[in-house]
Amino acid sequence: MKISAFFVAAFFALSLVACGKPTAPESASSENYGTTHEGKPAEGRNELPTEK
């Protein structure tokens, strides 16, 4: 039992080291919000709601 707990803990520690921490952009910018990865306006269900 102790050896299996050791292997589980070691596997968990190695997976954290291998994957690292989650990454995010340095600063959030909303200037491209509502556009596709190509810079075009979103269409269909991904469109931004119109302001009323």
Image (cartoon, rainbow, N blue to C red):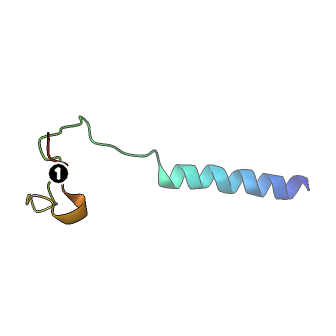
- How many numbered markers are drawn? 1
28 sits left or right of 13 in the view = left
How far across and how far down the image is residue 7, in percent? 76, 57
Query: Which of the pair 38/17 is nearer the observer?
Result: 38
- Residue farthest to the front, as pictured: 52
Query: Which quadrant would residue 47 be assigned to in this image?
Result: bottom left
Which structural element holds mark 1? loop
Q: Residue at x 75, y 56 (%)?
A: 8
Q: Is residue 33 left or right of residue 40?
A: right
| Above or below 8: residue 30 | above
Residue, disc 1: 34
Residue under the point 10% across and 58% down = 41
Residue 29: x %, y % from top left: 18, 38
Q: Is residue 17 left or right of residue 13?
A: left
Furthest-left residue in this view: 40
Q: Nearer the viewer, residue 33 or 6?
A: 33
Badge 1 local density, few (<14 within 10 Å), some, or many (20+)? some
> Outermost residue toward the top?
27
Residue 26, horizontal then vertical, whole percent? 26, 36
**Residue 36 locus on image (x, y percent):** 16, 60
Question: Which quadrant is home to the C terminus?
Answer: top left
What residue appears at the point 63 percent right and 49 percent down from the top-left corner? 13
Which residue occupies the foreground of this view, 18 or 26?
Answer: 26
Residue at 91% of width from left, 56% of height from top?
1
In the image, what residue type sits under mark 1? Gly
Q: For this rendering, which residue is in front, 51 or 37?
A: 51
